[in-house]
Amino acid sequence: MASNRSGPYLFVAEAVLPYLHESEVRQVFGLLADRFPGALLALNTAGPVFFDTQEQHDALSKVEARMQWYCPDPAHLAEWRPGTEVVASHTLTSLPDPLLAELPVAYQEMVSALTAQRLPQAEGYRLNLLRLP
């Protein structure tokens, strides 16, 4: 059932979906796609290295909650619902140059240092924008 309200819609799920089981994440996708066709969904995904090392992570290791779902390739999310489009997907070290240029110099330097280190955790954490069918 589609929403009776006109869009456009943007939903943001940052630091939420990885803590759900995959079946629950699929359910969220399905509900949003059914009720808000054409909506944008901004979400983060964690890859297997990020997922497997959460016990050693400086912040994640200090909380009880544990990630239950990881996504090695955000392109797979488009397979869950035919017509879903991955509009953008970036790691912290692959931000678009125009966006990077708008960041304060201290953040630009931090991203540069992360890029040089090529840390698997930094490469496995992605910021994604999807258009739902």
Image (tube, helix red, strand yellow):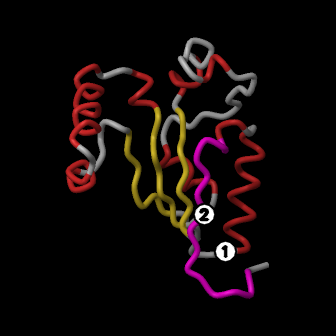
- What residue is drawn where x is 56% and y is 61%? 41
Q: Does residue 10 appear left or right of residue 32 in this picture?
A: left
Question: Which quarter of the rendering shows the C terminus?
Answer: bottom right
Residue 118 in the image: state x and y as whole percent.
30, 22
Quote the CA–CA distance across marks 2 and 1: 10 Å
- What residue is drawn where x is 61% and y is 23%? 60
What is the crowding at mark 1: few (fewer than 14 residues within 10 Å), some, or many (at least 20)?
A: many
User: Would you name the residue on which mark 2 appears?
Assistant: 11
Query: For the residue labelled by badge 1, is the local secondary structure a helix, a strand or a loop?
Result: loop
Mark 2–mark 1 CB contact (< 8 Å): yes
Q: Does residue 65 appear left or right of residue 80 in this picture?
A: right
- The amino acid type of the residue labelled 1 equals Phe
Which is nearer the eye, 14 or 39? 14
- What residue is drawn where x is 57% and y is 12%? 56
- Is residue 114 shown in magenta? no
In the displayed image of the protein, which residue is found farthest to the top?
A: 56
The segment highlighted magenta reads 3-17
Which is nearer the eye, 32 or 62? 62
Query: For the residue labelled by badge 2, is the local secondary structure a helix, a strand or a loop?
Result: strand
- The amino acid type of the residue labelled 2 equals Phe
Q: Is 96 placed above or below 85 here?
A: above
Q: Is 84 placed above or below 5 here?
A: above
Q: Does residue 50 appear left or right of residue 98 in this picture?
A: right
Label number found at residue 36: 1
Question: Which quarter of the rendering shows the N terminus?
Answer: bottom right
Residue 63 in the image: state x and y as whole percent.
70, 23
- What residue is drawn where x is 45% and y is 46%? 127
Which is nearer the eye, 13 or 79? 13
